[in-house]
Structures are given as structure tokens and as C-alpha cells.
């Protein structure tokens, strides 16, 4: 009582078929003939990215030191957009000692590290029998950023270029000044530097490498000079027995 009547779906379907039969429709028809036994072809595979976008060309850096330095001071170098003076490496390219710094100093004028930080470096080198004329000094950035520091956006690219530079130089002795310079090594012990000496085969030859504080840091914190002296002696004399 009060319930809705239940419709028989079979009767409804039979009634609909009977109506279509009375109307003269007795089969399913299409405009074009269809082969009902033919297999449906699989969907076409989507185009790969390589088919749509051309492969990015692999950059090839100059393989001689002369050509590489010309490229580093040309318009294709990252520093070309900084609009600040560029400083080239100093010293003989066949020197056994290579010193790596991060950026030119604000006081640099005619050459790299020509200000107070450079004069302190000269004294450090003289204490172990070296001079600016006997070592090769390489900056990671050939121009000084407006902030005075290499930005994180530029660092990875500049480190890559510095490593290629060292591949061409194949230094026997490598003195890395500061945290940014230390990153040219594949593996470091973090910061601040410890007293360890590294024997590496990263730049096409066996290299004795030491990480130390930058001279500009030593000028601001004279108490750290003792640690930097230890690093320099260790690089110069090698590990003690």
C-alpha cells in the first residue's frame, strides 16, 4: 500500500523493439560499410620529445690554454654581461704552482690581486720560496660581481669553467684560497679547512692540493694567519712522517 509500481524492464525493452519493428527498422545501418570481423588497430604511439624538439647541442670548450683564455675574455663568457673590468690569470702557464682565488678584489687595478690582499699573498709565497712570477694565479670569475661575491646562479657554471682551466694547466701544486675556490675539487672536507693535504688525480695528473683562507679574510682576522701558514707549509713541504 502506497508503494510505487515496479516496471518490468524486459517488457519495456520488448515494447521498444516492437515499436522500431513497426517503423520498418530491422537492422543497424551506417553510411559506410563496416567489416565487423576486422581487428581494431592499436592507437598510435605519442611522439617522443626527441622527435619534436631538436637535441640540445653539447658545448665544446677550447682545448688549448691560449684558445680557452681568448674565449674566457670574449663575449661568450658568463662575465661579459656583468659590465665590470675583467682580469686575466697571471704568471707562467707552465708553473708547477697554481693558486686559485674567487673574484678580483675591489682594489685591483692593473692586474689580479694587486691590492692589499695581493701584497699579503706575495709575502706568504715568499716565505715558501715562491713569488708571483713563479706561480700561476687563476680567478674563478674573471670579473668582480657588483656584490663582491659569486651568486649561486653563476657559481656552478664558473666552477665548471675553472675545472676545465685546471685540466689544461695540469698543476703539480694547487693552493685554493677560500670556500668558493675549494669547490673546484670533486670532494672537499667542508668549511673551515682542516689541516689535511690532498693528493688528487682530477686534472689529468697527480696534484698536491691544499685549501686555505683567502688573504682578504686574513687581513680582517689576523688570528687565523697561523692556520693559513700551516696549510701553506703543508703544501710546500708535503706530509711529515
Image (cartoon, rainbow, N blue to C red):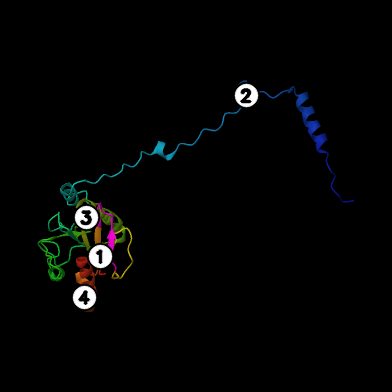
Number of the label disc, if any, that sits on residue 210: 1
As measured in the structure, the alpha-carbon distance from the residue carrying label 3 to the one carrying label 1 is 27 Å
The local secondary structure at tag 1 comes to: strand
Residue 120 in the image: x percent, y percent? Answer: 14, 71
In this rendering, which labeled residue sits more in front, label 1 or label 2?
1
Please report whichever mark, 4 or 1, sits nearer to the chain's N-terminal start: 1
Please report whichever mark, 2 or 3, sits nearer to the chain's N-terminal start: 2
Whether residues under marks 4 and 3 lie with C-beta atoms below 8 angstroms apart, the answer is no
Question: Is residue 231 found inside the magenta-colored segment of the image?
Answer: no
- Looking at the image, residue 198 sits to the left or right of residue 33; the answer is left
Judging by the rendered image, the residue that carries numbered circle 3 is: 79
Magenta part of the chain: 196-206
As measured in the structure, the alpha-carbon distance from the residue carrying label 4 to the one carrying label 3 is 32 Å
Residue under the point 17% across and 46% down: 67
Tell which of 93 and 70 is nearer to you: 93
Assess disc 3: are there few (<14), some (14-19) or many (≥20) residues with their C-alpha within 10 Å of its C-alpha. Answer: many
Please report whichever mark, 1 or 2, sits nearer to the chain's N-terminal start: 2
- Looking at the image, residue 146 sits to the left or right of residue 127; the answer is right
Residue under the point 21% across and 75% down: 225
Check the image and name the residue furthest to the top.
33
Please, is residue 213 above or below residue 206 in the view? Answer: below
The local secondary structure at tag 2 comes to: loop
How many badges with numbers are in the image?
A: 4
Judging by the rendered image, the residue that carries numbered circle 2 is: 38
Assess disc 4: are there few (<14), some (14-19) or many (≥20) residues with their C-alpha within 10 Å of its C-alpha. Answer: some
Question: Is residue 205 found inside the magenta-colored segment of the image?
Answer: yes
Quarter of the image holding residue 196? bottom left
Please, is residue 47 above or below residue 87 in the view? Answer: above
Number of the label disc, if any, that sits on residue 76: none
Amino acid at each position: 500500500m502506497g508503494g510505487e509500481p515496479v516496471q518490468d524492464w524486459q517488457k519495456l525493452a520488448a515494447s521498444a523493439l516492437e515499436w522500431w519493428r513497426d517503423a520498418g527498422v530491422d537492422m543497424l545501418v551506417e553510411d559506410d560499410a563496416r567489416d565487423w570481423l576486422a581487428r581494431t588497430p592499436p592507437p598510435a604511439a605519442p611522439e617522443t620529445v626527441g622527435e619534436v624538439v631538436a637535441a640540445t647541442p653539447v658545448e665544446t670548450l677550447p682545448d688549448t690554454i691560449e684558445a680557452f683564455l681568448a674565449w674566457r675574455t670574449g663575449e661568450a663568457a658568463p662575465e661579459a654581461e656583468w659590465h665590470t673590468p675583467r682580469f686575466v690569470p697571471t704568471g707562467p702557464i707552465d708553473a708547477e704552482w697554481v693558486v686559485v682565488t674567487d673574484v678580483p678584489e675591489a682594489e685591483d687595478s692593473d692586474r689580479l690581486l694587486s691590492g692589499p690582499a695581493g701584497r699579503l699573498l706575495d709575502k706568504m709565497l715568499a716565505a715558501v720560496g715562491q713569488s708571483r712570477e713563479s706561480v700561476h694565479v687563476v680567478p674563478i670569475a674573471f670579473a668582480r660581481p657588483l656584490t663582491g661575491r659569486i651568486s649561486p646562479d653563476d657559481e656552478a657554471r664558473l666552477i665548471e669553467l675553472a675545472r676545465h682551466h685546471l685540466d689544461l694547466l695540469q698543476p703539480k701544486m694547487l693552493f685554493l684560497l677560500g670556500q668558493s675556490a675549494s669547490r673546484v675539487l670533486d670532494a672537499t672536507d667542508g668549511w673551515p679547512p682542516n689541516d689535511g693535504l690532498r693528493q688528487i688525480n682530477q686534472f689529468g695528473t697527480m696534484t698536491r692540493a691544499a685549501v686555505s683562507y683567502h688573504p682578504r679574510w686574513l687581513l680582517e682576522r689576523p688570528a687565523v694567519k697561523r692556520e693559513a701558514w700551516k696549510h701553506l707549509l703543508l703544501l710546500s713541504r708535503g706530509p711529515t712522517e
